Image (cartoon, helix red, strand yellow):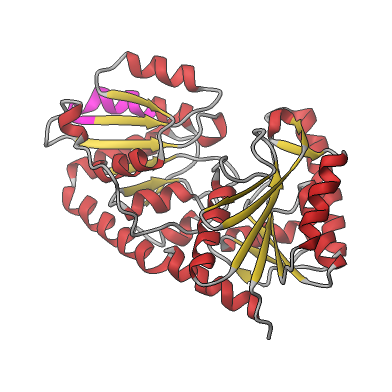
Amino acid sequence: MIDSKTICFVNARFYPDLGGVERYTLELSKKLVDYGYKVIVVTTNIDDNDSYEIFNGVIIYRLPIFKGLGGRYPILKFNKKYFKILKNIKKEDIDFFVINTRFYLTSILGLHIAKSKSKRSIVIEHGTGHFSVNNSLLDFFGRRWEHFVMNIVKLYKPRFYGVSKACNNWLLHFNVTASGVLYNGIDAHYKIKELKNLKSEYQIPNTALIVTYAGRFIQEKGIHVLIKAIEKVLEKNRNVYFFLAGSGPLESMVSEFAIKSDRVFFEGKMDYDDLMNLFRCSDILVNPSMYPEGLPTVILEAGAMGCAIVATARGGTEEIILSKKYGIIISEEDEREIFKAVNDLYNDPTYLKYISSNVKTRIIEGFDWSILALNFIKVIKE
């Protein structure tokens, strides 16, 4: 048994960029700090922030990079600044290393530092498919690059974990057997700072059903399929309203679609408090993803705020939505199933309330960071 007191997370990206992996690291780090651990995050300087910062008690080192693939794949820049920061990192008395994702150059760096210090390390997998840039040629070479980097990662012999069982199944693709699951989670007891009544603000009837999508506006997230389903719902039912929150390459398409209807509201990128308030005011979250998810944070967030969940089975979604008792699983790229699910829930408010309540309880009892952080501590001590 080891009693690690200083834990180092190594991420390709981190705060202020708060995607799924970044938020996972931040929220877990904050809990570990609460439990008395010193937490360091080694990451890259995507947005030209300070090279050294302390945020919410977490020490952050940011390494200089080239912005490969527009920043989606940061490439370490081996200049004087890099080696100066690296020297300071190596001076830290780190007990345990946590490498988030397996295919970035930072993953190799983190494992190399851990080996040089004779410290243990684990690699946490956050996906269930290959990295994609929606270009068949680049994706072809990208898959080979992933396998190349993964073969180097395996040489260091870390233990592997996934943020869902689905992630662990994906690791078998690389001939890796995971040691366990370190689930993604949320602050299930988050207190919204400013409560807003969206029905009153947007002049929506009290009897209306509010359906929300929140995420990146990219094809892999299924936003184009959702828009087709929304058109069908708008034709069928006058008492259903939609909120579309997020940003991305298809943002102009989404905003133009919303302009055409007085029952579709384009929210763009929202801050966390407003997003959680949107979930609180919504009846249903639709997540029509085709993306290689790990465990979709948006489902956890919306479910904890009382939304019924309608989602594809991507990633670990079925580890949250265990059965029809907890939500509705739909087929990918099928707007008819989205339409049917929304329409059925509108016509059966008792079932809507039933699954909303069940999934909320499940998330609060099983996916809150206060619980998951203790499980993480147990793992690193073994």
Location of residue 374 in the rendering, given as x and y in whole percent from the top left corner: 51, 74
Q: Where is residue 80, by image quadrant?
A: top right
Taking the magenta stretch, the answer to whether it contains residue 272 is: no
> Measured from the top left, where is residue 320 in percent x and y?
43, 59
Q: Nearer the viewer, residue 22 or 305?
A: 22
Residue 325 in sight: no
Position of 296 with respect to 239 (left or right) is right
Taking depth in this image into account, of 324 and 103 the one nearest to the observer is 103
Question: Which quadrant holds residue 179?
Answer: bottom right
**Toward the viewer: 149 or 293?**
149
Q: Main secondary structure of the magenta part?
A: helix
**255 vs 205: above or below:** above
Picture quarter containing residue 189?
A: bottom left
Asked whether, in this view, residue 339 is left or right of residue 254, the answer is left
Q: Residue at x 24, y 18 (%)?
A: 262
Residue drawn 47% across and 59% down?
185
State the residue in front, 267 or 179: 267
Q: Is residue 70 left or right of residue 196?
A: right
Residue 232 visible at all: yes
Q: Which region of the structure is painted magenta? A: 229-240
Horizontally, residue 213 falls left or right of residue 346, namely right
